[in-house]
Image (cartoon, grey):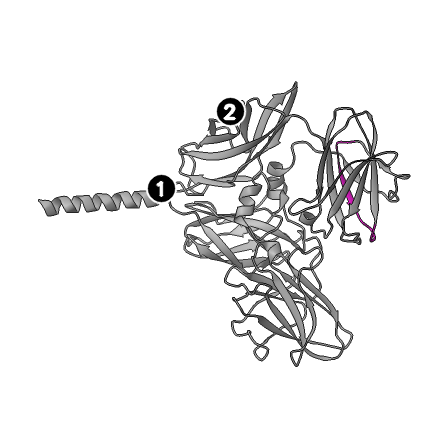
């Protein structure tokens, strides 16, 4: 009898364990794509590496393409075809959709340069891997080791060597050394202008012969995630365009489209300012070293104006210095770009009048790549909102939760959160944030008639009314993006605000036709 009861208890324990595993099964963890680049206008087969990748039913991409998912759900290959008239270079994002949820975004290049794989034996000068011009090598650096490549060049020939790593989310901080045939260093490159932590070496050979390229992590780190794409030939465009189509931007673009203002020279002195009407989005460039751009606008007494800059997130090497002045040159406020801030200041004006905005490169740099953008707008009472979640999964009929945090600005009233992009059959609960409350745990009730593998991009909008003015702001998913790709200094702004919901076999912690034409 005791043995019988013991067997029943054991069976019950195993059943409970299996049930718990089903309820809290891990979402797919996609860690690497091979190759790292798609060829424009052609089909590329991507090999997927990671954990919990079984049961792939679809692939979501930020860009236009065709996806072929094998009928064998255990296969780790998917075919991606880019349109013939599509972009010739850039970087885009993709996510796996499996029977147990969505992966975090992985980034892939679009690059016309043909790819080869790095060999596993090229860790010394003597075993350097031969590399032809106009070829790219996909590899990963090992800890405390360098990868070596051998190239041939003629006297006076221009050599362009580029490493793409952190621009597609790799933790590798690449260092390139160019050596002569004896191993003596003749040039090197670390962080290159406009490339963030990536490296570009542009060099003319002093004589005809063989040269060696050494590639390693600047901190001697390494591992499977420290992947790279080493390109020998013409460099990629700077900045490298993020590839995104309208099916994404409709969930991420600002709810208010500001008028565009282009920097118009000459506007480099307070005697010749460029007028504009705020609110506006200004696009400018420091055309030469020590360039200055001066803009003129009108503000009213009591008006609170916010000026926010973008440079590094655009692939620009600029750091902004911003200063507000009266028309007679009296300083009102100023700000430098510091840390993750790309230049921002806020000012409440004490009198009606005309004011100048001075924009300079903090280190007095300038040139074709020294771009910047400024958003100039009045700050009204309202809220900013963020979420640390950008993907949720669960069975049809389940209730899924998204937590949003509010940052209030001169407003303590209630805020209503609405889901934009989900069909009307989805219901929201607990989506009204009471007055003076800053955290909401929204419940999304999923319809019971959806199929396994269905997925829905959406965004959450925070709405309210203050001082007789309605406001609406998109909930930012930037905390989730930074957590997903911590090595990417500036995750693409084009993905900020995009959430994904998928129908899975079970709730995850964080069959469709095999051919799907995007957009």
Q: Nearer the viewer, residue 346 or 86?
A: 346
**The furthest residue to the right:** 271
Residue 368 in the image, given as x and y percentages of width and height: 79, 53
Q: Please give the residue where the numbered disc 2 appears in the rendered image.
A: 432
Q: Quadrant of the C terminus?
A: top right
- Name the residue located 64 percent from the left edge and 22 percent from the top edge: 470
191 sits to left or right of 171: right
Could you classify mark 1 by the number of other residues whose Cα lies within 10 Å: few (under 14), some (14-19), or many (20 or more)?
some
Q: CA distance from mark 2 to mark 1?
A: 28 Å
- Work out whether 182 lies above or below 278: below
**The furthest residue to the left:** 1
Q: Nearer the viewer, mark 2 or mark 1?
A: 2
- Work out whether 226 lies above or below 419: below
Task: Report helix, strand or loop for mark 1.
Answer: helix
Q: Please give the residue where the numbered disc 1 appears in the rendered image.
A: 23
Q: Residue 387, which numbered label? A: none
- Name the residue located 69 percent from the left edge and 45 percent from the top edge: 342
Task: Point out the stretch of residues depicted in magenta.
Answer: 278-290
Residue 216 visible within the image: yes
């Amino acid at each position: 009898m005791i043995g019988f009861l013991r067997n029943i208890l054991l069976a019950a324990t195993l059943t409970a364990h299996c049930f718990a595993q089903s309820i809290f099964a891990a979402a797919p963890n996609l860690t690497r794509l091979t190759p790292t680049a798609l060829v424009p206008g052609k089909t590329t087969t991507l090999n997927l590496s990671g954990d919990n990748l079984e049961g792939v039913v679809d692939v979501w991409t930020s860009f236009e393409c065709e996806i072929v998912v094998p009928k064998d759900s255990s296969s780790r290959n998917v075919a991606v075809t880019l349109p013939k008239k599509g972009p010739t270079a850039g970087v885009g994002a993709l996510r796996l959709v499996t029977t147990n949820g969505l992966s975090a975004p992985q980034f892939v290049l679009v690059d016309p340069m043909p790819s080869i794989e790095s060999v596993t034996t090229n860790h010394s000068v003597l075993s350097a891997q031969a590399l032809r011009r106009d070829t790219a090598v996909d590899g990963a650096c090992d800890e405390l080791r360098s990868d070596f490549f051998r190239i041939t060049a003629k006297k006076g020939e221009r050599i362009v060597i580029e490493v793409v790593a952190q621009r597609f989310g790799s933790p590798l901080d690449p260092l390139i050394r160019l050596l002569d045939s004896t191993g003596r260093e003749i040039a090197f490159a670390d962080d290159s202008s406009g490339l963030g932590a990536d490296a570009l070496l542009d060099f003319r050979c002093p004589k005809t012969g063989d040269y060696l390229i050494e590639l390693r992590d600047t901190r001697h780190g390494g591992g499977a995630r420290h992947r790279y794409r080493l390109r020998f030939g013409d460099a990629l465009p700077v900045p490298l365009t993020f590839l995104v189509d309208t099916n994404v931007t409709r969930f991420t673009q600002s709810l208010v489209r500001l008028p565009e203002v282009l920097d118009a020279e000459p506007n480099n002195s307070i005697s010749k300012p460029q007028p504009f009407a705020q609110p506006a989005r200004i696009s400018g460039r420091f055309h030469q070293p020590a360039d200055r751009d001066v803009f003129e606008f009108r503000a009213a007494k009591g008006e609170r104006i916010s000026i926010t800059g973008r440079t590094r997130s655009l692939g620009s090497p600029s750091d902004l210095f911003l200063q507000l002045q009266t028309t007679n040159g009296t300083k009102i406020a100023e700000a430098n770009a510091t840390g993750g801030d790309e230049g921002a200041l806020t000012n409440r004006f004490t009198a009606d009048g005309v004011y100048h905005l001075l924009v300079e490169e903090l280190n007095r740099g300038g040139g074709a790549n020294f771009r910047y953008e400024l958003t100039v707008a009045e700050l009204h009472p309202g809220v900013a909102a963020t979420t640390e979640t950008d993907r949720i999964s669960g069975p049809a009929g389940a209730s899924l939760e998204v937590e949003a945090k509010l940052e209030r600005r001169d407003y303590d009233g209630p805020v209503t959160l609405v889901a934009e992009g989900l069909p009307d059959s989805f219901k929201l609960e607990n989506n009204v944030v009471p007055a003076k409350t800053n955290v909401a745990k929204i419940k999304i009730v999923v319809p019971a008639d959806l199929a396994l593998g269905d997925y829905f991009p959406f965004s959450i909008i925070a709405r309210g009314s203050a001082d007789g003015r309605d406001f609406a702001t998109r909930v930012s998913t930037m905390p989730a993006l930074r957590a997903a790709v911590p090595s990417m200094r500036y995750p693409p702004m084009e993905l900020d605000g995009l959430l994904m919901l998928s129908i899975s076999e079970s709730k995850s912690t964080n069959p469709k036709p095999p051919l799907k034409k995007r957009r």
